[in-house]
Amino acid sequence: MPSIPPSPSPSPAPATGPQLDAVVVGAGFSGLYQLYRLRELGLSVRVFEACDDIGGTWHRNRYPGARCDIESTSYSYSFSPELDQEWQWSERYATQPELLRYLHHVADRFGLRADITLRTRVTRTVYDEDDHLWQVTTDTGEMLTARFVILATGCMSAVKEPDIPGAAAFEGQALHTADWPREGVDLTGRRVAVIGTGCSGVQAIPLLAEQAATVTVFQRTPVYALPAHNRPLSAEENAELKAHYPQFRIAQRQSRGGTVFEPPTRSALEADDAERTATYAAAWESGLLSGLLRTYNDILLDPAANETVAEFVRSKIRTIVTDPATAETLSPRGLPYGTKRPCLDSGYYATYNKPHVTLVDLTKTPIVEITRSGIRTSERNHAVDVIVFATGFDAMTGSQIAIDIVGKNGTTLQEKWADGPRNHLGLLSSGFPNLFTVIGPLSPSVLSNAVVAIEQHVEWITDCIAHLREGGLTEIDATAAAEERWCAHVADLAGLTLYPAVASWYTGANVPGKPRVFLAYAGGLDRYRAQCDAAALDGYRGFTLTSLADVGWGRPRTGLLRNSGGASGGPPYPLRDF
Ligand code: N01
């Protein structure tokens, strides 16, 4: 399949570089698979990756203790049965180095590296309405045009800089978990402060405490963490898994969240105390991140049901942490279980039993400033040699907004999303045609197994591009009406849950000035997949598909070929009409 012919009249700014079918931004799990799929179509594709190597999240988050918290056998690509058979996971929850080795293996096995340009950040992309092409600019000065741009920029890649006065004054070593030095850091004999107790802090703190002379944890909000029960995978287990991989992968794709389980049907309030405690204890022992959320069907819907599980976790914290005051400080109060992402604990709570580990409760003694020598709270100065910022990300939208994206009529994505992200099906934002997002906002993304969600998006996008090519079409855009309905639907679903009331990165509340919007689709990956499939089956209902007369995919057509609301065939699903 030859590339699209060069545009006859490039505008608004001349592009000097080559013309491609697609530019993919980011070379993590999403970007690698998107490249693989588009190359299968025979398209010319270039992936730009800002880092000095591939791997995305798993390249950058090298802090001690970083590992996946969905089982590796499930948190991995499903598209290649051969890959499933040849790759051997060594642990139930793979470490960051093993996950990165896996992604390198994938890149090598499928020959992906040739189309990936490293150390190059896409800084700006402008839509040329005349030619239906994106003009893409990078920080290395490259300019090129592409029919499609796919943002595979990740949900957790825009690091949230510490918003604490004096941070620049610190004369010791300052580290961010998401930007950990490649060569590692020797903390032996050093006094280490950790700010932040989300998943990154929870994973890092036990490992930091193994090395450092002292560890002082500055906690603003305690989290709920379940024991990971991580362990090596035996040869027998691996053989068993591989024997059933094909069926498992199908079940995974059909599942609610990308991991296979039977959705609960009973309310927590229908069970008596003894039954609930036994159910929660079994979930606690399962070592599964979503174990407790799977016990009853109203944990995330009903505050009273939620409180039963919250109190169960608090009771567990009290049994692990020997000092009652520390146990209480670590126990979330007034925070419904699961409304901030739960964490998996590999020695986190037990670390607070060590004499050289101290917990500072910032709700009682807030940080006033970072000084030259450490961290000053309202109580005193804590002198330290190293500060580890485990302060998180501008999640879901940060990595997209960071690119200067100019769509139709000169509107920027920043302007369009000023009050929160807007798109149809989490895939395309109206006025930004041919600009797809992989596991971005208003899709299930962070509420599901990310790899399964990535595969669903990449496959939908690839099928869509193939459809455009087959029809000689050159542009797909979301209709404003469909987008309006989708945003309302996502908000309505979130409104049924306990999520929106909580200040978290799910709601954008962790970034000062960010609009407060629940950022993910809470209806489940299975229902979401059905809606995406139904829209495609129904002639890309909710999208406008057009073509140019003499620029395109070989079979030129003119004018509007399809539009929203078409009823050809109809979806096989009893779903709302978007
Ligand atoms: O970030 P977070 P994260 N002063 O935003 C605190 C994924 N992930 O990097 O809650 C003091 O969750 C903040 O306090 P508060 C996963 O999806 C996955 O840990 O705002 N404290 C909070 O405690 C996860 O949810 C894995 O009150 C400040 C912490 O910093 C997501 O990434 C591993 C502060 C930030 O927690 C983000 O996790 C790691 C301040 N000024 C991450 N600013 C896996 O296992 C922030 N905080 C796959």
Image (cartoon, rainbow, N blue to C red):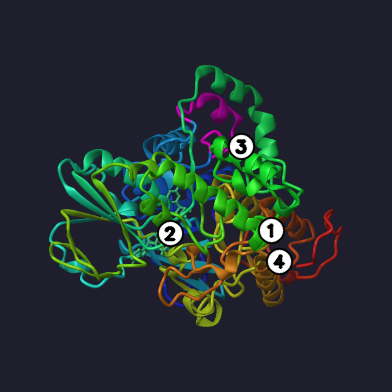
In the image, residue 174 above or below residue 480? above
Q: In this orientation, does residue 334 appear?
A: yes
Assess mark 2: CB under 8 A from ligand 1?
A: no
Amino acid bearing label 1 = Gly
Quarter of the view holding residue 535: bottom right
Choose between 256 and 105: the one closer to the eye.
256
Q: Nearer the viewer, mark 4 or mark 3?
A: 3
Graded by Cα atoms within 10 Å as few (under 14), some (14 to 19) or many (20 or more), the crowding at tag 2 reads few
Where residue 231 appears, as percent x and y from the top left, is 46, 28
Q: What's the magenta region?
A: 71-91
Measure the alpha-carbon separation of dots 1 and 3.
26 Å
Graded by Cα atoms within 10 Å as few (under 14), some (14 to 19) or many (20 or more), the crowding at tag 1 reads some
1 or 3: tag closer to the N-terminus: 3
Disc 1 is placed on an element classified as: loop
Graded by Cα atoms within 10 Å as few (under 14), some (14 to 19) or many (20 or more), the crowding at tag 4 reads some
| Mark 3, residue position | 282
Choose between 315 and 219: the one closer to the eye.
315
Q: In this orientation, does residue 62 appear?
A: no
Where residue 352 appears, as percent x and y from the top left, is 33, 46
Task: Confirm whether the magenta stretch covers residue 32.
Answer: no
Task: Confirm whether the magenta stretch covers residue 85.
Answer: yes
Choose between 298 and 28: the one closer to the eye.
298
| Mark 4, residue position | 557
| Mark 1, residue position | 523
Q: Nearer the viewer, mark 1 or mark 3?
A: 3
Q: Nearer the viewer, mark 1 or mark 4?
A: 1
3 or 2: tag closer to the N-terminus: 2
Q: In what quadrant does ligand 1 lie? A: bottom left
